[in-house]
Image (tube, helix red, strand yellow):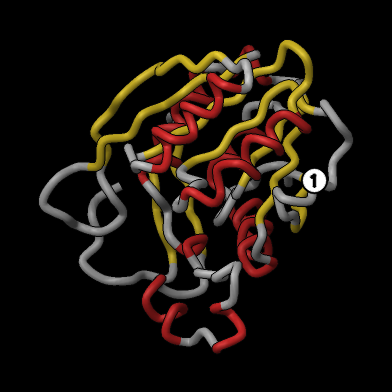
Amino acid sequence: MTGLKEYTPVIDVNLCGRHWRLERAADLESLWEAMGDEDFGDDERLPYWTELWPASLVLGQWLYAKQKDIAGKYCLDMGCGLGLTALVGSWLGAKVVAMDYEPQALRYAARNARINNVASPLWTVMDWRHPAVAPHAFDCVWGGDIMYERRFVEPVLAFLEHSLAPGGVAWVAEPNRNVYTYFLTLLERHGWKAHRLAMEKTSALYEQPAAVTVSLWELRR
């Protein structure tokens, strides 16, 4: 993927040894400007889902490396957005449930499954504050750049504790936001073990002076 100079309705990505084509609604700024007052309540439904973040690229490549570990397993993608990492997991043979808070994101993610000829994950609108999955149902849970604010940390941690099976693993890719320092501190308090698997410099969707440094974490009980 080369850095874009302006918005395009289709994103072309070469990842995991193949080409991916992702359709999307509009650029983040345009969707943001179109939001009404009702969208700026406590939840602030900001349309981050319409972009492809560097953390998703690092996470997708990691799933590709771990194909033998996820094939045939029940896996959950937290905050799937346009669907790239969910599609990678499904393409690799995982039984993927992909959740997002925004219904419009899931409509595009489902369309992207068809475009890329990948068996569609189970797409579901879900708020991680209110888990709508059975307790301990997933062998693997993953998410790419899912926390932007400190207030998200406790709900995400509680959701991981609810959804991950005993002996399961969670992978979280993040661009070294300060909020993740707090997240890692709480993990330790709650008896989780966090191991940084990699730290990579990755190009962003749009051209910018420097690559984004993404850390990939593995979380286990």
Vertical placement of residue 104 versus 165, above or below = below
How many numbered marks does the figure carry?
Answer: 1
Q: Residue at x 25, y 42 (%)?
A: 212
Q: Amino acid at mark 1?
A: Pro
> 190 left or right of 161?
left
> 138 left or right of 206?
right
Residue 15 seen from this side: no
User: Picture coordinates of residue 54 (x, y %)?
Assistant: 36, 44
User: Picture coordinates of residue 72 (x, y %)?
Assistant: 76, 21
Q: Residue placed farthest to the front in the image?
A: 189
User: Picture coordinates of residue 113 (x, y %)?
Assistant: 65, 51
Q: Quadrant of residue 192?
A: top right
Element carrying mark 1: loop
Label 1 neighbour load within 10 Å: few <14, some 14-19, many 20+: some
- Foreground of the two, 144 or 4: 144
Q: Quadrant of residue 26?
A: bottom left
- Foreground of the two, 43 or 22: 43
> 52 left or right of 151?
left
Q: Residue at x 36, y 29 (%)?
A: 215
Q: Quadrant of the C terminus?
A: top right
Residue 179 seen from this side: yes
User: Picture coordinates of residue 35 (x, y %)?
Assistant: 52, 84
Q: Residue at x 44, y 35 (%)?
A: 182
Q: Residue at x 25, y 61 (%)?
A: 4
Q: Quadrant of residue 121?
A: top right
Q: Residue placed farthest to the right in the image?
A: 134
Vertical placement of residue 84 versus 105, above or below = above
Vertical placement of residue 100 versus 217, above or below = below
Task: Identify the residue position indicated by label 1 in the image.
Answer: 131
- Foreground of the two, 37 or 69: 37
